[in-house]
Image: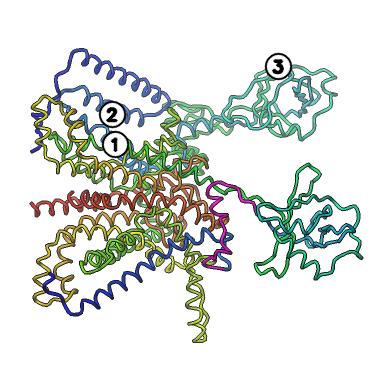
Amino acid sequence: MAITAASVKEPPKALGKKMLVWAIAAVVVLVNLYADACMYLNGDIVYPLLDIIIVGIGVYVFTSKKMYAQRYAFPSVATMIAFIIFPLVYTVYISFTNYSGEHIMTVDDAMKYHLNAVYRSEGGDYQFKMVSAENGRYRLVLTQDGKSFVTAPLALETGAIDPDAKPVQVALKPAIESDTAAQAVSMKELVAHRRALQKLELVIPDSSIRLGMSGLRQFSAESPKFSVIAKGAKTPEGLEVNVERSLYDNEEHKLFVPNMETGYYQYANDQGLPEGKTYAPGFRANIGFMNYTKFFANKSVRLPFLQIFIWTVVFAGFTVFITLAIGMVLACLVQWQFLAGRGLYRVLLILPYAVPSFISILVFKGLFNQNFGEINMFLEMIMGPIYSLFGATWTAPEWFTNPWLARGMILIVNAWLGYPYMMILCMGLLKSIPDDLYEATALEGASPLQNLRYITLPLLLKPLAPLLIASFAFNFNNFVLIQLLTKGGPDIIESNVPAGYTDLLVSFTYRIAFEGNKGNDYGLAAAIATLIFILVGFLSLLQLRLIRQNADQRV
Amino acid sequence: MPMVQSKNLKYRKASAHLFLIVFLAFIIFPLLMVVTISFRQGNYSVGDVIPTPETSTLDHWKLALGIPVHGYARVSGADISFVKTDEGKTVLYAAENGTDPFEAFVTAPFSVKDAEHASEDQRFAVKAASPDTAPDSANLLSDDETYALSSALNGKLDISVAKDDGSEEHYSIEANDRSGTSYGLYREKVTNPPFPVLHWLWNSIKVAFITAALIICLSTTSAYAFARMRFKGRAFILNSMLIFQMFPAVLALVAIYALFNRIGSYIPSLGLNSHGGLILSYLGGVALHIWTIKGYFETIDPSLEQAAAIDGATPWQAFRLILLPLSVPILAVVFILAFISTITEVPVASILLMDMDKLTLAVGAQQYLYPQNYLWGDFAAAAVLSGLPITVVFLLAQKWLVGGLTAGGVKG
């Protein structure tokens, strides 16, 4: 009998202790609220929300009297929410966006990027030279049609400069003859300082003209290319602005608006809507089901996806079947009471399960190597003479470049890795089959095969079913095997997303997200991940139902 | 069943043994190969597949243990010749033969007799310098005498040549092949360990140990609540835990990366490229362990705790003083399972960790077998070195682990 809710009540506490609990709760709440406020001001919404939810539930659970039982469960539930469920939900969200290598910033960052752009405005170009001043400083001397200006000595840094740093305003004053006659520093020295020079904004005295570096020999008058224009306002041309974060192009006198469907800024047409050429950098935008429809619309995505999906199902199904078959036969053998040395056999047979999988997979990668691998050397040793006997020459199998051999290799390696688990499970279940069943069949003169067919198999398969589904789901998502052994290769050439003949859906997803040749397409990867989530969720529901059925029957 | 023994039992037993032995030969083959490869010379399997004691080397093991290996590499651009001096000593000339640039040197006169007593560890030291003049061709030993002398000096000399920049280069005379059909000049070469394997192993053990300990803390308290208390949402939480732990983390890597990137911008020690962040991410995987421990708790009779409760123990006291001491075996099983599953985890660690000295073994070990830098022999030694302790722990704990696996799985 378990303790019922009525019997589990919070034990009464002294007033001092109660105060302490409330004080700690207050501190936790205040610290987290402060952190959340900071995060929110930094432009985050999701993370402070996640924090508030977890902390809020936590404080409620630990202070409310009714929630005494939940206190024990809360910490692990909270970590699961933060590190399993949140990433899941976030992944599903990403699948509805165009988040990728080309669309990595937010629309606000893209706007800031465009606002940094400048164009050459009136005021013309100035030739300049850099001359040495005292203490390793430099002066800049600018000339245009006989007019000359000079700066005060400037300390210029070399090397990388923070690209987000604000331009440095420097006042110019009319130059005297000694300045214009001074010897310019070498081009090499100039180039070494060019990043610092590009950050300068020189101000012509008594005018609003600002000069920026426009080449290695000249500074030019420049103005910001874009300026912010509010939604609802009208451009000088009378076009109404109906998109947030629109910009006005001061040079071409056109409206520049973010297109939330393509994830790029574009120029507006007569109706004030984005049209025509897109301008990098792209930004993240919600694109609805576009990532999902890519499978149907785009043949070069759909074909590899279907191919990989079929291979994944075949791989997982075949692995479960073969490991179960091997494991069951071995379990029956090592449980056989007449067999001597059963203990030793058992330990040796479990060995592949005891060796860490990442090591054994890499070992197989080396052993199967086409040129230096020991497996091909042994095959050569055995098959070479046999082939030459018949006048043929033995060619080494190309385990990593032939699609079918690569798939065969993966199945062999996974059978090696997986059969001990099935053997262990079967061993445990065999013990629960009563011996008198076999005695009865022995009296009737049944063969071992008949025993297996009519007693062992039916009695094993029922309790094994949920575990077989779990094993199927595990192998369906067996990323480590593929990543360490073949990395998905050999590649499917016709595909324009990274895809290989041995890729499983998970490794395919991983490669789209992290190894894409056209930039990493996180959105597409998340869409495939979401499809797999649905499938895995379905499988685990099925598993749960089977477990429950077994439990009901046993009672 | 002993009462009904079939006549062909003997043959059946023999064929069962035969089958098991053949099967085991195939299963154990890769593991035995790795052990032999770790003792083989070089990183490519040329020559022997199975090394004999004469051809085996401990170089890969030294590198795996982080010890630099001193070896000798042939200087193909050099010819050696000997000259006898009047005092009965010998001078060695090494000259460029035109195939490779090489700076010629001549040794100080030395006694061959003394050199012959030197050993592999205690070589006979000879100083050498750039030659002022070419050797007098009249005093040069004949080819046969040179061969005899080279064979006598094989592996015994340590010729140090002072370079202009103050450094020293060490040369030796070694056989070009095992049977000693020819000899050549060899330059000492120090091979540094390619990767910090022991450091990676330590990282792995550290992360796995802390993760397993924290998982025990989290999962025992939760399992207690789920096993002994009835509250709203209990079944829902239990079932959804079982479902969610089946989703592979590799599919949510982008989100996990983004999450820890954000955490790291506020608390760097829990962010990207930190072991704290990695441990934190592993804590999400408590669900299966909660189920296992809960299953065990349910096999323990609650009357003990009820008796304690009547005597005035709080639920926490009943849990800590009665239930926990009774469930040490299952805690050990869960600890080892969590430990092993953490040590062998690849995708999350490969995304969260970047620096070479922060990597865990499972992520770092891949670097041995890049096609551009294929270190098969070095990998074999590192694999045996790091895989052996984990394998031994597993085999020792096997009896309990097997019980735990089937208990957690079958009972549900």
Number of other residues with Cα within 10 Å of mark 2, as a class: few under 14, some 14 to 19, many 20 or more: few
> In the shown orientation, is residue A194 left or right of residue B4?
right
What residue does disc 3 label? A205
Q: Which x, y percent locates residue A148?
A: 78, 22
- Residue highlighted by disc 1: A81
Judge the density around disc 1: few (<14), some (14-19), many (≥20) Cα neighbours within 10 Å.
Answer: some
Mark 2 is on which residue type?
Ile
* Residue A340 or residue B345, whichever sits in front: A340
Q: Nearer the viewer, mark 1 or mark 2?
A: 1
Q: Quadrant of residue A447?
A: bottom left
Disc 1 chain ID: A
Q: Is residue B363 placed above or below B23 in the rendered structure?
A: above
Residue A262 visible in image: no
Does residue B62 belong to the magenta stretch?
yes
Judge from the rendering whether residue B86 lies leftward or rightward of residue B144; answer left or right.
right
Residue denoted by label 2: A53
Rendered location of residue A431, percent (x, y): 17, 59
Q: Is residue A261 above or below residue B60?
A: above
First of labels 1, 2 by sequence position: 2
What is the distance, in whole Å, between disc 2 and disc 3 at their CAs?
A: 57 Å
The amino acid beneath tag 1 is Ile
Q: Nearer the viewer, residue A484 or B172?
A: B172
**Looking at the image, which residue is at 84% across and 54% down?**
B109
- Residue closer to the observer: A335 or A476: A335
Q: Quadrant of residue B54?
A: bottom right
